Amino acid sequence: MKYLFNSSGKHIANFVNGQLHATNGPNIGHYLEQQGIFIDMHGRYFGEIVYDNRLLYRTNSPHRSVNYGNYGNYGNVGNYGNPGNYGSIGSVGGFVDVPEDKLTP
């Protein structure tokens, strides 16, 4: 299990067994290892890990126009708690924070 944060250090998701889960547990995405990206529950580009634990959206990602299909729902992993704020990294060129509405099922 890995806690994931946005650029300001807020805990926004958990990476558990190849799946992306909301902070309260529901499955919100899947990790595609070969591409190094996360897709949402509809198969669309969701974001990628930057600086080891930041989940960010690459604004010019070539994966944005691809639909990878439906990988199913892996259920709810429960709440792993809140690790607190990890600290801001400022803005990262070519990346923005994943929109809040994508982080909830």
Image: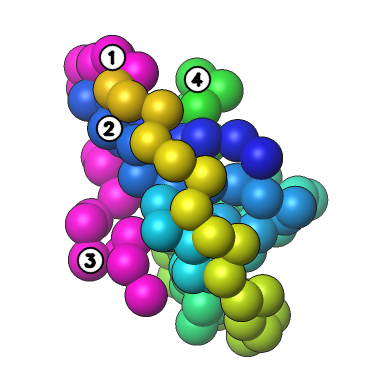
Nearer the camera: disc 4 or disc 1:
1
Pinpoint residue 91: horizontal percent, then vertical percent: 22, 22
Query: 8 above or below 60?
Result: above
Is the residue under label 3 in contact with that under label 4 (CB below 8 Å)? no
Please tell me which of labels 2 and 4 falls first in the chain.
Answer: 2
Please tell me which of labels 4 and 3 falls first in the chain.
Answer: 4
Q: Which residues are magenta?
A: 86-105
Q: Residues within 10 Å of mark 3 (few under 14, many from 20)?
A: few
Please tell me which of labels 4 and 1 falls first in the chain.
Answer: 4
Q: Please state which amino acid type lies under the numbered disc 4.
A: Tyr
The label on residue 101 is 3
Q: Please state which amino acid type lies under the numbered disc 1.
A: Gly
Q: Please state which amino acid type lies under the numbered disc 3.
A: Asp
Determine which quarter of the picture holds residue 73. bottom right
Report which residue position mark 4 lands on.
Answer: 51
Separation (CA) of disc 4 from disc 1: 12 Å
Mostly what secondary structure, the magenta segment? Answer: loop
Q: Residues within 10 Å of mark 4 (few under 14, many from 20)?
A: few
Q: Residue at x 35, y 44 (%)?
A: 12
Pinpoint residue 79: horizontal percent, then vertical percent: 48, 53
Query: 74 above or below 50?
Result: below
Callout 3: helix, strand or loop? helix
Callout 4: helix, strand or loop? loop
Report which residue position mark 1 lands on.
Answer: 87
Please tell me which of labels 3 and 2 falls first in the chain.
Answer: 2
Separation (CA) of disc 4 from disc 3: 23 Å
Pinpoint residue 46: horizontal percent, then vertical percent: 44, 59
Query: 96 above or below 47?
Result: above
Pinpoint residue 80: horizontal percent, then vertical percent: 52, 45
